[in-house]
Each structure stands twice: as structure tokens, then as C-alpha cells.
Amino acid sequence: MKTVYSLALSATLISTAFAASGSLANPARQYTWQHENVLGTSFEIKLTAASEAAARQGEAAALEEIDRQAKILSAYDPASEFSRWTRTRNQAVKVSPELLEVLGLFDQWRSRTNGALDASAEAIGRVWKTAGAAGRVPTSAELDAAMEAVKRTHWSLDRAAGTATHLSDTPLALNSFAKSYIMGHAADAALAAGGVTAVVLNIGGDLVIRGARAEPVDLADPINDSENTVPIAHLLVRDRAVATSGNYRRGVQIGDRFYSHIVDPRTGQPVDHVISSTVIAADPSTAGALATAFSVLTVDESRRLAATLPGVEYLLIERNGHQVASAGWTHFEAPQSRLGAAFAAKPAPAPAPAPQAAGAAWDPTMELTIHLELARLDGMRARRPYVAAWIEDKDKFPLKTLALWFDKTRWLPELRAWNRDERMRAMAEGSDITASVASATRPPGKYTLKWDGKDNAGKPVKPGKYTVCIEVTREHGSYQVYRQEMDFTGKPAQITLAPNQEVAEAALEYAKKGH
């Protein structure tokens, strides 16, 4: 995720903050907004529009379509059409075209993947969640029962009559590609709103890119997936969907082992041989389905399946870090994101070096991790607040900016503590493009930042005491600032910060890298 300034401030650190542009010549026509808690994760929409009013209409149309489709397909809303249908049994029920289509797609993908993608994998997932909550792995009997339930026939469809008959009592969830399916319809709705010529939807790390726009996309590193980690790939994508599945953000910890939330319905076991699967395809449902399936199938099985599907490209990251790419993947690769190109054209001025005391160098095996969870407002979706995070020395000199999230440069003054310093502001001037980030789905509002002990010029600082600063403010909302001094001399430490109106949880962890 990290194409950088000359000051090493990364694209992802700015993280979808700027009014992102597909054209350097006319950035005023580009509009970006972020929300939390949309389809259970984070949401970003970028629109190329004739006016802000037209862009807002496009945003409203996309969100309205997402809400409409969620009321049909959600497995987590007991009032959704899908949930109501699962409470019927052996009865042909007239269903919406959307539910009929998605159930049919699940039938197709279950067959194409030889059972690796299955809506009834929910039964196995629940067994692992229940056992994990009790601090144990499931018993053989529990897994055998779940796998027997998976093998049943769960529904039959009559497309001519528009009916679906629910046949089993096996738990079902329309995961895998339902989100991508909804995103495709939402992007279409935004484009149809009038005055919108291009749209980029990013929901939890999956993207749909439509219209007159080529979007720079940074692919998150599954081994080190903090917001400000260097990406493993830079892409340039137009009129495609990009979906990523991986085991690195969700799962259960049992003892000293982490178990992925992705399970193989054929074995009942969580899978971790492929830790990240990214698929590019014209159809969002295809991209979403294959991203999940390729996390379950062997690499050879994935390669053979992809060969039967024209226009599908992929990048798989195996457990040992080895990358496996399709032959056409390189057609989407870029030497750097367009954000990086923009900064190369107008480099930010380097700050004067901070004075440093003599002493040993920063321990390169240690790093600071900032865990940040933004508060949910009444449990509903809400626009993401503006956030800045940085490191200061004892003289309050800003050594390193770790995050800067905002949607328009005019809101920078709202980040009063960060904005007070000319060196800080200089890093945001003239910046109106940022790459979208493709990644495994994150829980809503949960973010991780890391500091490796280097300043904005990329030079290691001396060990000692520094202040971690986190500033969070919301338009027409509250203003919150953390300033926490911490000792960085090689001794591990953890500090929990008090929650507030904008931050549900915040913690600082200084420890060995990759611990």
C-alpha cells in the first residue's frame, strides 16, 4: 500500500484521504467519501462527476442500492429475504430475481470448484467459532457432523417460476461473492445517477472500477498488513473488479495458534496454504468467488480453473511468501502507483533534521504497533472521522507522520495539532491522488499502524523517549487528541489508551517485529 513521497509518507498512510483523481488535469471533478460499517466493513467511494452535487447523488444512489441488496441477501439480518427464506422448508417460495440469481451462482461455483466454494461452509465455520470461544479445537465428532450437513442438497431452483425451495436445516451464508455482487449493482446505480462518469467502490478491500477512469491500486502485504506497510504490488485497473481473500485479518486464536476464518468445506479444516488470493475479472461476482475459492484450492487446482475462465488474472501468496501469478497479471502491474508519480513530479520539501543525542542506534528488530478502533455511532454506518497519527521527539519536533486521513484539503485545519506545523502541512500540499487499497476484508473501523523507528527521511532515530500523537476529529462532531510518551530503548512495552467519543479502543505495543 505504500508508494511514497520523497519524505516516505506513503499512499496508504494518507489512505484514501484526498479527493482522489483519475486525471491530474482536472482534480476538482474528483470526489471521495468514506464510511464505516457498510456491509460489516469499511467503505470508500470515489466519483468523477460534473459537480459535487452530482457526486453526492451518485454516492447516495450507491448506498441506497447497497441497503436494498443487503435487505435481500444478508445472512446476518434476520429480517432479510434470505433469512426469512431459510426459515421455510420443502416449500417453493417466490423469491426476488437477485436472490434467485445468487443462489444459482452458488450452485455454479460449487460445481466449478468441486465443492471448495459452498454456502453451507457456514456450518463448519460456526463449529470453529464455538470451539474457539471455548479455547479449544473442535472434536472429530463435531466436524464430522458439520461436514455431513454440508454434503446435503440445500435448495432447488425453478427459474421459470422464479421460486426457490429450501431443503435442509444446514446453516447457510451467502458469503464469498455476495458482497462483490452487491458492489457491482451499487457501482451501476452510481453511474446511472446522472452527471457521474466514473466510480470506484472499495468495500473492505474489494474493488469495483467502472467508467472513464483508470484506478491505481495497491495490494496489501498479507504478512505485514498495517495501513502504512509497503504494498506487494502496484496495479492500474480500469473497468474491472478486484477481489482479495486472505486469512490474515479474521479468524480465531486457540492456544498459540491462529486459525483462519476460511475453511475447506471438503475437509472441515481452516486453510492457510495460501494466505492471500487476489483476482481481477470483469464481473465482480466472478472476482469475489474465485478469490475465496483460490484460498481453498491448491495452487495447481486454481491454475487449472482460471485457465477455463477468459479474462481472469490472479496473484496468490503462499504461506512461505512465494508469489504465483497468472500470465496476464503483468498487464495490470505498474512500476509505481500514480500517487507516487504525482509526488515525483512535485516532491515535498524535506524537513530539517531533528537534533539527536549520541547513543546506540534504534534496535531494528523492534517496532511500534498502534491498534486503533474508531467508535461506531449508535451501531450505524457513519462517515469516517479525520485522523492523523505521528511521532514527536522531546522538543515536539514531528519526526514521522504515520497516518493522515481526510477527504478534502479544506478540512486539514480541523486536525489542529497535526496542522500546526509547516513541515507537516507541506507533506499534503498539491496531493490529490491516492491509490485504492486491495486487501482481505477488515472489521469496520479497525486499523493498524506501525513505526519502525525511522523518520520522514527514512533514517533511524536514536533510542529514547518519544511521544506518540493521535488526533481524531469529525465534521460537526467531537475533537480528540492522544499524546502518549513512550520509551523506545529495546524493552517491550504495552500501553492502553482511554476510549473517547471517536475512538472505541486504542493501544500502543512496542515489541519484536512479527511477534
Image: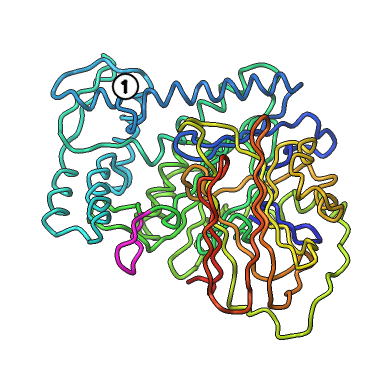
402 relative to 89, above or below? below
> Residue 48, located in which quarter of the rendered image?
top right
Q: Position of residue 488 (x, y in %)?
A: 63, 74
Q: Position of residue 465 (x, y in %)?
A: 68, 72
Q: Position of residue 39 (x, y in %)?
A: 45, 34
Residue drawn at the location 64% of the way across and 53% of the way down: 482
Residue drawn at the location 28% of the way across and 27% of the way down: 83
| Predominant SS of the magenta segment | strand
Residue picked out by circle 1? 81
Q: Position of residue 276 (x, y in %)?
A: 47, 57
Q: Nearer the viewer, residue 170 or 10?
A: 10
Question: Taking 66 as reference, is 187 left or right?
Answer: right
230 relative to 207, above or below? below
Residue drawn at the location 49% of the way across and 36% of the way down: 37
Q: How is the image coloured?
A: rainbow
Q: Nearer the viewer, residue 481 or 31?
A: 481
> Residue 62, located in which quarter of the rendered image?
top right
Task: Provide the residue span drawn in magenta.
Answer: 251-260
* Amino acid at the residue labelled 1: Glu
Question: Taking 357 as reference, is 284 left or right?
Answer: left
Would you say residue 257 sits in the magenta stretch?
Answer: yes
> Residue 501, located in which quarter of the rendered image?
top right
Q: Nearer the viewer, residue 246 or 53?
A: 53
